[in-house]
Image: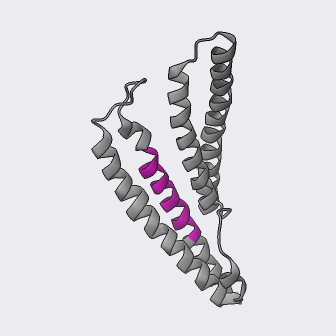
Amino acid sequence: MVDKIKLILDRTILGVTSLFTFVLVAGALWQVTSRYVLGAPSTVTGELLRFLLVWTAILGATYAFGTNQHLAITFLKEKFKGKSRLSIRIINDLIILAFAILIMFKGGIEVVSITMSQTTPILNIPMGYVYSILPISGILIVIYKLLLLKEYQQEMQQREEV
């Protein structure tokens, strides 16, 4: 069950970020074409690309956290074996979980609510929509880490049975 949920999350995030990346490339090509060939740069495209880049980067980081491919300092973890190594991994993931809940989700909700009254200069959309990726990614990281902690629990039970 854990693997199935994780697979659905992985595919969804990769699909969305792939779509955003395609739009970024197409938008950048249009931006260059409109600026240098047509002589009239598209202002809408520039602002949209900035916001999509933020969304793509944060969703990519969310995927990295979910698959444990994020940047990590592993020298401490590598010094331990067995249960000690698993304990270090659990502590690390609990710290990430706390960060995702307190900073990304709770802080992200506050940023979104504060900036909903501010609009972007060109697209005229609330800035809260741009910042809404923070609580969304926070929730996704929480789900990923809870699934990973469940896997650790199963791993510990298997070790005790042996």
Mostly what secondary structure, the magenta segment?
Answer: helix
Q: Looking at the image, is 40 positioned above or below residue 3? A: above
Viewer-nearest residue: 152 or 160:
152
Camera-side residue: 155 or 111? 111
* In the image, residue 14 lies in the stretch drawn in magenta: no
Measured as percent of width and height from the top left, residue 101 is found at 41, 63
Q: How many circles with numbers are drawn on the protein?
A: 0
Residue name at image x 61 percent, y 56 percent: 6
Judged left or right of residue 48, residue 151 is right
Quadrant holding the N terminus: bottom right
Query: Quick check: 73 above or below 3?
Result: below
Q: Is residue 161 visible?
A: no
Q: Whole-percent x and y of residue 115?
A: 31, 41
**Where are the magenta residues, as a range?**
132-148
Q: Is residue 132 left or right of residue 47?
A: left
Query: Measured along the vertical axis of the image, is residue 50 above or below residue 12?
Result: above
| Residue depicted at x 54% and y 66% | 145
Q: Is residue 33 left or right of residue 121?
A: right
Image x and y of residue 156, in percent: 62, 83
Residue 137 place in picture, x, y as percent: 49, 52
Along the line of sight, the residue nearer the viewer: 137 or 128: 128
User: Is residue 118 shown above or below 86?
Assistant: above
Q: Residue at x 44, y 50 (%)?
A: 134
In which quadrant is the C terminus drawn? bottom right
Determine the residue positioned at 50% across, 74% down.
94
Outermost residue to the top: 38
Q: Is residue 113 left or right of residue 143?
A: left
